[in-house]
Image (tube, rainbow, N blue to C red):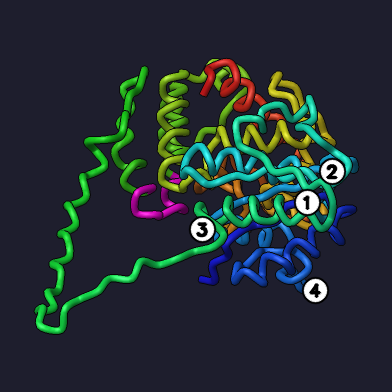
Amino acid sequence: MEQFDVFLAHNSLDKPEVRAIAEKLKLYNLKPWLDKEQIFPGDNIQKVVFQGISQSKVGAFFISQNGLGNFQEHLELGAIIEYFRKKNKVQGFRVIPVLLPGIDDIPDDLFYLNQWAWINFKSSNDEEALEDLIRGIRGRSVIQTQPVIQIPETSPIIQPIPPTRPPEQPPAKTDDLSSEKGIDYTRLRDLLAAKNWKEADKETYRVMIQAVGKKDGDYFDRDKLLNFPCTDLGTIDHLWVKYSNGHFGFSVQKEIYLSVSGKADGKYYKEAWEKYGDHVGWRVNSRWIFTNVTFDTSSTPGHLPYLYSSRGKLGNIPEFESMLSFIGSVMGDIVVYLFFRIETCKV
């Protein structure tokens, strides 16, 4: 898998300035991810973008007088920032805010970015700011020197013994599998640890339907989701977030929903729900996928859990084209109830 030193996220209106900075980074043997160089005709834009973030060591996002706006069509820069924040929290992913000429401070509506040291380009040829950016990407000085060690000719060369790697601890010792309803989450944990996303998705449906007092094959309803046990919701979400490195999970999905103007108030907002579907890959070319789910981390962030089992979370709904828009709206009703519960439970 190709690796990049830094992912360059920016408003599409700022592309000329960002591209010029990317070219300068290359002169220092750095490999930036730039959309114009990595997205080709026919590509699924969201999939390629989020793959690029996953393959990058550092995330830099550029802020200008143009505001956040769109990074690509139907892909808002705000969603990229939210993913950066989640990856920073889970993996320690380095995040660098970069202010372009014309803006001298973090905007008030992005106050949370002040947690990271930011860089301010006073002009397009600001060499000092460029050096700061390079240091931030490398995590060290721009000019790298190696110490010279003199070894006497008669000295024997001793090969160091590589340190032995401590055995990995079984996940059972580190995971909190608490449940208010006596649900055993061991199998879900093991499936997620094994990266068996499809079976883990089915198991998530199974344990959740048990937690609300129903049986396998039943579907969720409004009251059950609005009162879903908080401890169990937190356990399920934590396992998904941990074993996907922040790529999947209900809390990840909720943050994406909020980033597209959704509200976690238990109400259905059609426009926000459709934007959310576009972002997480549940809706492709304005049509809900229903069964065509991608069960691996090449999917967009938030694609899972989808809760599709033998009947799925919607019950036994016929699978044919004319039903897809109806299915999308029903899914929206159900998932927004879950997002509301995540908010009230502080998951």
Q: Which callout, 1 or 2, points at the residue further toward the start of the chain?
A: 1
Instruction: Identify the amino acid type marked 4.
Output: Pro
Instruction: Give the quadrant of residue 53.
Output: bottom right
Question: Is residue 308 among what the camera can see?
Answer: no
Q: Nearer the viewer, mark 4 or mark 1?
A: 1
The mark that comes first in sequence, 3 or 4, is 4
Residue at 41% x, 38% y: name it: 239
Q: Tell me which residue sits at (62%, 43%) in the image.
A: 83
Nearer the observer, disc 3 or disc 1?
1
The numbered disc on residue 296 is: 3
- How many angstroms separate mark 4 from mark 1 (CA)? 20 Å
Circles 1 and 2 in contact, beta carbons < 8 Å: yes
Question: Contact (CB < 8 A) between labels 3 and 4?
Answer: no
Q: Secondary structure at mark 1?
A: loop
Q: Secondary structure at mark 4?
A: loop
Q: CA distance from mark 2 to mark 4?
A: 28 Å
Q: Earlier in the sequence, mark 2 or mark 4?
A: 4
Percent x, y of residue 38:
71, 70
Q: Amino acid at mark 2?
A: Ser
Residue at 55% over, 46% down: 94
Q: Mark 1 or mark 2: which is in front?
A: 2
Which residue is labeled 1 in the image?
Answer: 10
Look at the numbered disc 3 and give the secondary structure of its residue: loop
Residue mark closest to the camera, 2 vs 3: 2
Say which label, 4 or 1, has the lower sequence index. 1
**Which residue was labeled with disc 2?**
64
Specify the amino acid type for callout 1: His
Q: Name the disc covering residue 41, or none.
A: 4
Toward the bottom, the furthest residue is 153
- Which sits earlier in the primary sequence, circle 3 or circle 1? 1
Magenta-tinted stretch:
192-202
Mark 3 and mark 1: Cα distance apart in space: 27 Å
